[in-house]
Amino acid sequence: MIKKIALFLIVLMVFSSLAAWAQSGQYTATQLYQKAQRLQFDVKADPAKLNQRSNWERIIKSYKLIIDSYPNDPLVDDIIFITGGVYKEMYQIFGNRSYLDRSIAQYRTVLRDYPS
């Protein structure tokens, strides 16, 4: 139990730091994107992390932070598409229909807002 609490606090601190850095402009959208990709890779590579919903939610938050902080960056359409894939994976792992609905919504956003 103590390990779970410690892990949660560490995750919370990392995400808070990431949000603060993005808002202060210390990181570019590309740097945040690379960090989000590494987080996603780490979760997918570790069977212990793979089935923990909180890890997947951190991935989504990391990508959404970029979308919110840099809405006009050229990477945004790719990131929205990637979040669609992350939600699809969450649906496959956790079986929650709302993740599939979110995945479809992300893909539709890309088609509607970035048609080329």
Image: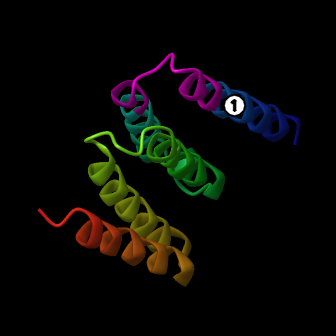
Please report the residue visible at 32 percent of the width from the left and 39 percent of the height from the top: 73
Residue 98, position in %: x, y? 55, 79
Q: Main secondary structure of the magenta part?
A: helix
Q: Looking at the figure, which quarter contains the C terminus?
A: bottom left
Colour treatment of the image: rainbow
The foreground one among 110 and 57 is 110
Pointer 1: what residue? 16
Look at label 1 and name its amino acid: Ser
Please report the residue visible at 41 percent of the width from the left and 65 percent of the height from the top: 89
Please report the residue visible at 57 percent of the width from the left and 57 percent of the height from the top: 51
The foreground one among 47 and 103 is 103
Hey, which quadrant is residue 36 in on the image?
Answer: top left
Q: Is residue 38 magenta?
A: no
Q: Secondary structure at mark 1?
A: helix
Please report the residue visible at 27 percent of the width from the left and 51 percent of the height from the top: 78
Task: Answer left or right for 66 relative to 21.
Answer: left
Q: Residues within 10 Å of mark 1 (few under 14, many from 20)?
A: few
Q: In the orientation shown, which residue stands out farthest toward the left?
A: 116
Residue stretch rendered in magenta on the structure: 18-32
Q: Looking at the figure, which quarter contains the N terminus?
A: top right
Residue 11, position in %: x, y? 69, 34
Q: Is residue 30 magenta?
A: yes
Number of disc labels: 1
The foreground one among 35 and 10 is 35
Task: Answer left or right for 2 relative to 35.
Answer: right
Residue 9, position in %: x, y? 79, 33
| 91, above or below 83, in the image | below
